[in-house]
Image (cartoon, rainbow, N blue to C red):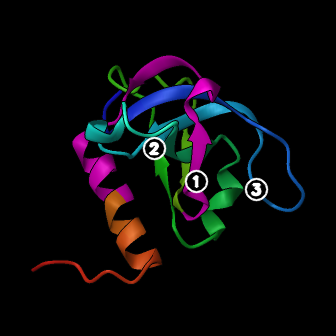
Amino acid sequence: MNIGDIYAVEIPPSNGHEQAGTRPAVIIQSPRFELRLPTVLIVPLTSQLKAQMFPGTFVIEPDAANRLTTRSVALVFQLRAIDKRRLKNQIGKLGQADLTLIQSHIKQLIQIEEEN
C-alpha cells in the first residue's frame, strides 16, 4: 500500500455529509506506518461532478494508470482515517500531477504554507 494507490473502500454510514458506501479512495498515508497503525488515511472519490463546488476538490480523469471508469471528484476536504480492513481491492494508481494536487489541497485546508 503506497501513497497514490487507489483502492475500493467501504466507508460506514454516518450522520451528516460524510461520504459513505463502497467507493474508490486514494491512499495518502506513508507506507512506513502500514505495520504500525491499524488505520490508513484516505481521500474519498465521488462520481458526482457537482461536488466540485466545494473547496478542496478537483476532477480526476480516468486513465490507464488509475483505472477509474468515470470522471471522479477527489474530496480532499473529506480526508479521513479508516480501518485497513475496509480496503477491498486495489483499482489503480494516481498520476503524479493528481497526487501533487491532493497534497496541495491538504496543505491549503490545514494552512501549511507551500514551499517556494
- The local crowd at label 2, few if under 14, some if 14 to 19, many if 20 or more residues have their Cα within 10 Å, is some
Residue receiving disc 3: 18
Q: Residue 97's spot in the image, x, y percent?
A: 25, 49
Q: Residue furthest right?
A: 15
In the rendering, which numbered label is found on residue 12? none
Image height of 16 relative to 43, above or below: below
User: Which image quadrant is residue 70 in?
Assistant: top right
- The local crowd at label 1, few if under 14, some if 14 to 19, many if 20 or more residues have their Cα within 10 Å, is some
Image height of 31 relative to 108, above or below: above
> Do the residues bearing badges 3 and 1 touch, measured as CB atoms within 8 Å?
yes
Q: Residue 75's spot in the image, x, y percent?
A: 57, 55
Residue type for callout 2: Ile
Of marks 3 and 2, which one's residue comes earlier in the chain? Answer: 3
Describe the element under mark 3 as helix, strand or loop: loop
Camera-side mark, 2 or 1? 1
Residue receiving disc 2: 60
Camera-side mark, 3 or 1? 1
Of marks 3 and 1, which one's residue comes earlier in the chain? Answer: 3
Cα–Cα span, label 3 and label 2: 20 Å
Quadrant containing the C terminus is: bottom left
Residue visible at 64% across and 28% down in the picture: 86
Q: Residue 57's spot in the image, x, y percent?
A: 53, 62
Camera-side mark, 3 or 2? 3
In the rendering, which numbered label is found on residue 80? 1
